[in-house]
Image: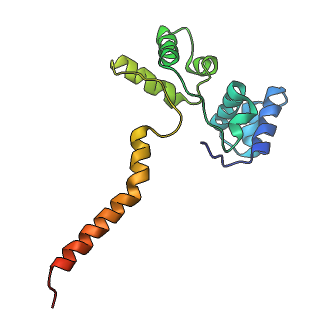
Amino acid sequence: MTFYKYPKEFMLKLIHFYLMGDYSFEKLARQYKIPQSTLKEWVRKYEAFGEAVFRSNFSPRCYTRKQKIQAVEDYLSGEYSLLELMKKHQISGRTILMKWVKKYTSHCNIKDSGKGLSKTMTFIVANKRDIKNVKKKKWNDLHSKRNFY
């Protein structure tokens, strides 16, 4: 989940100004005191995912192993720029693609991505309170066995 510093309506207004050809990135950045790179990122995300990307509960899509490998192979072929690939494969961020590239080139296993916590993480989160209780019980047991004067 992504949280934005600016209101959704404000971001959409600037995106529409740019897409309608009324303003350049440079002019918008200067007028609204926002880095050009931020504006470019908003436009790229808007073009890939639509207005939904700016909702606070937006969750980027999951990718299969096959989709990840295809995106990486397209990147390594040199036919597309990083931004073109992100748009083509609807990848929400540069770092996601670069992680896939790193795994692929280092011959690590690329897996399907899933939503939510893994079974292990769910177990850990569910049992966190139990662990605290066990530690507290051990501490109490230890002190009850000692005779303090």
The image's colour scheme reads rainbow
* Up-down relation of residue 124 to residue 140 (above or below): above
* Viewer-side residue, 38 vs 128: 128
User: Horizontally, is 126 left or right of 29 in the view?
Assistant: left
Q: Give the image location of residue 8, x and y in percent.
A: 75, 44
Q: Give the image location of residue 49, x and y in percent.
A: 69, 28
Q: Quadrant of the C terminus?
A: bottom left
Residue occupying the point 36% across, 21% down: 109
User: Horizontally, is 60 left or right of 13 in the view?
Assistant: left
* Viewer-side residue, 61 vs 92: 61
* Up-down relation of residue 11 to residue 129 (above or below): above
Q: Quadrant of the N terminus?
A: top right
Q: Give the image location of residue 148, x and y in percent.
A: 16, 87
User: Horizontally, is 33 left or right of 119 in the view?
Assistant: right
* Up-down relation of residue 109 to residue 4 (above or below): above
Q: Give the image location of residue 57, x and y in percent.
A: 66, 43
* Up-down relation of residue 44 to residue 121 (above or below): above
Picture quadrant where residue 14 is located: top right
Picture quadrant where residue 91 is located: top right
